[in-house]
C-alpha cells in the first residue's frame, strides 16, 4: 500500500492542537474570561426586552421582533463558542480544574438560553399564520425560517412556558441528577483482572476494551468479570433507570404526548414511518449477517458466537500508518472525489486543528467541535499507528468539513439532527476504507479490513436494534409502574434474541445486563440514544453510493446536501438531494444490501 510504513517501530509524530489563536492562555486566558463575562448578563437582558415586545405581530411590531430573534441567535452562537472552547480545555487535560469550572459556568448560560428558547417558542405559537409568514419572509431571518417554524410547532406540543421552564429547572438536580449518579457509579467501579500472570485493577471501560482482544479466552473471562460486577450494581441501576423514565413519562403525559418516541423523532427531524421502514430493512439481512459470523467463528476456532465476540479482531495488516502518512492517505483519496474536501483536510492538518498526541492526562474518545465565530473547528483523538486511528481521523475530519461548509450559515440553521450529523463523517470513513481495501493484496490484510467493515454493520444493525427494542418496550411497561431488575433482564434478553436472530449462542451468547452496563440508556440529554446511529450510517451509505456512481460530478451536490442539513427534515433532505422517499422500503433495502455486500467476499477469504 502506498504512503504507509512497513516498519513496526516507527513512532507517530502526532501533534497537539493549536488553541491560542482562539483564546490564548488556556483556562487562564484573560480573553476567554472577558468573552464569558460578556455573555453572563445577556440572557437576562434579552428576557427583559422580550417581555416588553408587542404581543401582536404586525407591520409596526415586526422589526423589534426580528431584532429580538437575531439577538437570541447571536447569544446562542456565543454560548456555543464558549462551550466548545471550554470542552477543548478539559479534554486535553482532564485535571484542568479551572477548565472544568468554566464548563460548569457555560452550562448555566446554556440553561438560560434554553429557557429563552422556550419563551420564544410560546410567543411564536401565539402569532397569526399570516403575520408569521410575513416575518419569516423578511430577508434578515429568511435563511432561518425552517428552525423558526420548528420552534413554533414545538410550542404547540409542549406545556405552558412557565411549566416548561419549571420542568427544566427541576431537571437539573432531579432528572439529570440521576444521569450524573449513574456516571459516578460507573466511574467508581474497580475490577481486578488477571492476564499473563499479572493482576491489574481496571475501570469498567478498560475491562470492556478486553472484548477486542485477539485471545478468545481473555475476552470470555473479561466478559464474565464484567457481568459479575454489573450484577452487583444492577439494583441501583434499575432504580436510576426507572427514575429517569418516570420523570420523562410524566413530562410527556403533561405535554399530551402518547408515545415515548415523540421526542426522539422530533429531535431527529424524522417520521415514525421512516424509522419503521429502516428497521424492516435491517431485519431482512440478519440471516446474511449470520453467514458472516459463522465464517468468523472458523477463524476464531469456536462453534459459538457470543456477545464478547462482536469486537473480536481477525486478520492483520503488517503495516503501520503514522499520523503524517495517514493524513496524506486521507487527503489523497478524498481528493479523488472532491478537490475542496482534500484542500480543507490538508488545511485542518497543517493548521493544527487536530489534537492527536498519545499522552497521559487526556480524555478518552474522539470528537469534532465547532468554533463557529472563528469559522474553525477542532478534532480531538489519541492517535496510534494503526488503521483504526486512520479511520477515526478520517471520520472526524468529515465532521469538520461539514462544519466548514456551514461556517457562513446563521447559527440556528446549523443545528442538524443526529441522523444527518454522521453523513460527512461516515462518508469519509467509507472513502478511506474502500481505498485501503483496494491497495491491500494479501489475504490477512483483506480479512482485517473487510471484518472491520462488517463488524461495524453487525453493531449498527443487531446491537443498536437491541437497544431500540429494549428502550421502546421498557417505556411501554414503565408507564404502568416500576419495572424490576429481573424483569429488565428478561426484557433485554428478549430484545437480543429478536435483534440477533440465531447469531448469538443460545446458552452462553447473551448479555442480559446490557441495560445496566450501557451508558446510552442513562443519557438524559437525548432520549432513545440509539436509532440515529443506524439511520445515519445507512443514509451516509446511500450518499456514498451516489458519489461512487457520479464521481467528481457529485461533489457540488454533496456540498449542497450538507448545507441543507440544518434547514430541512431528514426526509426533505433525502428527497431534494437523492430523489428518494425515506418513508418507503426501497432506499433502506438498497442501503442494507450495500452494507452487507462484502459478506460473500469475507466468507470466500475464510474458506481459502
Image (spheres, helix red, strand yellow):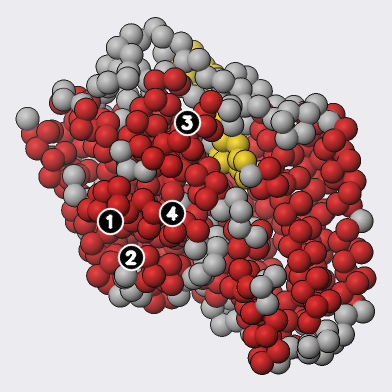
- Tag in front: 1 or 3: 3
395 vs 410, nearest the viewer: 410
Decide which of tag 1 and tag 3 comes sooner along the chain: 3
Residue found at x 59% / y 31%: 353
Decide which of tag 1 and tag 4 comes sooner along the chain: 1
Q: Are marks 2 and 1 in contact (CB under 8 Å)?
A: yes
Decide which of tag 2 and tag 4 comes sooner along the chain: 4
Mark 3 neighbour class, 10 Å CA radius: few under 14, some 14 to 19, many 20 or more = some
Question: Dot 2 corresponds to which residue?
Answer: 578
Quadrant containing the C terminus in the rendered view: top left
Decide which of tag 2 and tag 1 comes sooner along the chain: 1
Question: Viewed as shown, does residue 262 lie left or right of 39?
Answer: left
CA distance for labels 4 and 3 = 18 Å
179 vs 373, nearest the viewer: 373
Question: Dot 3 corresponds to which residue?
Answer: 346
Tell me the quarter of the picture where residue 158 sits.
bottom right
Q: Which mark is residue 559?
A: 4
CA distance for labels 3 and 2 = 28 Å
Q: Are marks 3 and 2 in contact (CB under 8 Å)?
A: no
Question: Dot 1 corresponds to which residue?
Answer: 546
Helix, strand, or loop for circle 4?
Answer: helix
Question: Viewed as shown, does residue 110 lie left or right of 450?
Answer: right
Q: Are marks 4 and 3 in contact (CB under 8 Å)?
A: no
Residue found at x 62% / y 19%: 360
- Tag in front: 2 or 4: 4
Quadrant containing the N terminus in the rendered view: top left
**Rendered location of residue 461, percent (x, y):** 34, 55
**Rendered location of residue 167, percent (x, y):** 77, 70
Decide which of tag 4 and tag 3 comes sooner along the chain: 3
Amino acid at each position: 500500500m502506498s504512503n504507509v510504513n512497513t516498519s513496526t517501530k516507527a513512532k507517530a509524530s502526532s501533534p497537539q492542537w493549536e488553541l491560542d489563536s482562539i483564546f490564548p492562555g488556556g483556562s487562564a486566558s484573560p480573553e476567554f474570561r472577558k468573552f464569558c463575562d460578556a455573555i453572563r448578563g445577556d440572557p437576562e437582558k434579552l428576557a427583559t426586552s422580550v417581555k416588553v415586545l408587542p404581543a401582536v405581530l404586525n407591520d409596526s411590531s415586526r422589526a423589534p421582533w426580528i431584532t429580538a430573534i437575531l439577538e437570541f441567535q447571536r447569544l446562542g452562537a456565543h454560548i456555543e463558542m464558549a462551550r466548545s472552547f471550554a470542552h477543548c480545555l478539559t479534554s486535553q487535560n482532564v485535571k484542568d480544574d479551572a477548565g472544568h469550572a468554566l464548563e460548569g459556568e457555560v452550562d448555566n448560560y446554556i440553561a438560560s438560553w434554553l429557557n429563552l428558547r422556550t419563551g420564544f417558542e410560546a410567543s411564536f405559537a401565539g402569532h397569526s399564520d399570516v403575520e408569521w409568514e410575513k416575518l419569516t419572509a423578511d430577508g434578515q431571518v429568511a435563511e432561518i425560517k425552517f428552525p423558526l417554524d420548528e420552534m413554533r410547532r414545538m410550542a404547540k406540543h409542549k406545556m405552558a412556558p412557565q411549566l416548561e421552564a419549571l420542568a427544566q429547572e427541576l431537571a437539573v438536580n432531579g432528572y439529570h441528577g440521576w444521569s450524573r449518579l449513574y456516571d459516578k457509579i460507573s466511574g467508581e467501579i474497580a475490577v481486578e483482572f488477571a492476564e499473563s500472570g499479572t493482576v491489574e485493577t481496571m475501570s469498567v471501560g478498560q475491562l470492556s476494551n478486553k472484548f477486542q482482544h485477539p485471545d478468545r479466552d481473555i475476552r470470555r473471562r473479561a466478559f464474565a468479570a464484567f457481568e459479575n460486577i454489573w450484577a452487583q450494581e444492577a439494583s441501583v441501576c434499575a432504580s436510576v433507570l426507572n427514575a429517569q423514565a418516570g420523570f420523562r413519562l410524566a413530562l410527556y403525559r403533561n405535554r399530551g404526548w402518547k408515545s415515548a418516541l415523540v421526542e426522539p423523532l422530533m429531535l431527529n427531524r424524522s417520521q415514525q414511518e421512516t424509522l419503521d421502514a429502516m428497521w424492516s430493512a435491517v431485519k431482512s439481512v440478519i440471516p446474511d449477517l449470520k453467514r458472516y459470523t459463522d465464517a468468523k467463528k472458523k477463524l476464531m476456532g469456536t462453534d459459538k458466537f457470543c456477545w464478547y465476540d462482536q469486537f473480536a479482531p481477525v486478520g492483520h495488516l503488517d503495516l503501520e500508518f503514522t499520523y503524517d502518512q495517514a493524513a496524506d492517505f486521507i487527503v489523497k483519496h478524498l481528493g479523488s472525489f472532491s478537490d475542496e474536501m482534500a484542500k480543507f483536510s490538508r488545511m485542518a492538518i497543517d493548521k493544527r486543528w487536530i489534537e492527536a498526541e498519545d499522552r497521559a492526562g487526556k480524555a478518552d474518545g474522539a470528537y469534532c467541535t465547532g468554533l463557529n465565530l472563528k469559522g474553525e473547528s477542532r478534532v480531538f483523538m489519541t492517535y496510534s499507528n494503526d488503521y483504526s486511528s486512520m479511520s477515526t481521523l478520517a471520520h472526524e475530519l468529515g465532521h469538520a468539513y461539514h462544519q466548514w461548509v456551514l461556517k457562513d450559515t446563521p447559527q440556528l440553521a446549523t443545528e442538524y439532527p443526529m441522523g444527518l450529523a454522521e453523513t460527512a463523517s461516515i462518508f469519509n470513513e467509507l472513502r478511506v476504507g474502500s481505498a485501503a481495501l483496494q491497495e491491500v493484496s494479501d489475504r490477512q490484510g483483506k480479512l482485517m479490513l473487510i471484518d472491520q467493515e462488517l463488524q461495524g454493520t453487525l453493531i449498527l444493525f443487531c446491537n443498536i436494534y437491541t437497544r431500540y427494542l429494549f428502550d421502546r418496550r421498557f417505556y411501554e411497561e414503565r408507564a404502568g409502574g416500576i419495572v424490576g431488575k429481573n424483569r429488565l433482564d428478561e426484557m433485554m434478553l428478549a430484545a437480543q434474541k429478536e435483534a440477533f436472530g440465531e447469531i448469538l449462542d443460545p446458552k452462553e451468547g447473551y448479555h442480559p445486563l446490557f441495560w445496566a452496563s450501557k451508558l446510552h440508556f442513562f443519557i438524559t440529554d437525548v432520549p432513545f440514544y440509539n436509532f440515529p446511529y443506524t439511520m445515519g450510517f445507512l443514509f451516509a451509505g446511500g450518499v456514498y453510493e451516489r458519489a461512487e456512481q457520479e464521481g467528481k460530478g457529485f461533489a457540488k451536490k454533496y456540498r449542497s446536501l450538507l448545507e441543507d442539513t440544518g434547514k430541512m427534515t431528514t426526509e426533505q433532505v433525502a428527497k431534494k438531494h437523492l430523489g428518494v422517499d425515506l418513508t418507503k422500503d426501497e432506499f433502506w433495502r438498497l442501503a442494507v444490501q450495500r452494507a452487507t455486500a462484502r459478506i460473500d467476499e469475507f466468507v470466500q477469504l475464510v474458506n481459502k
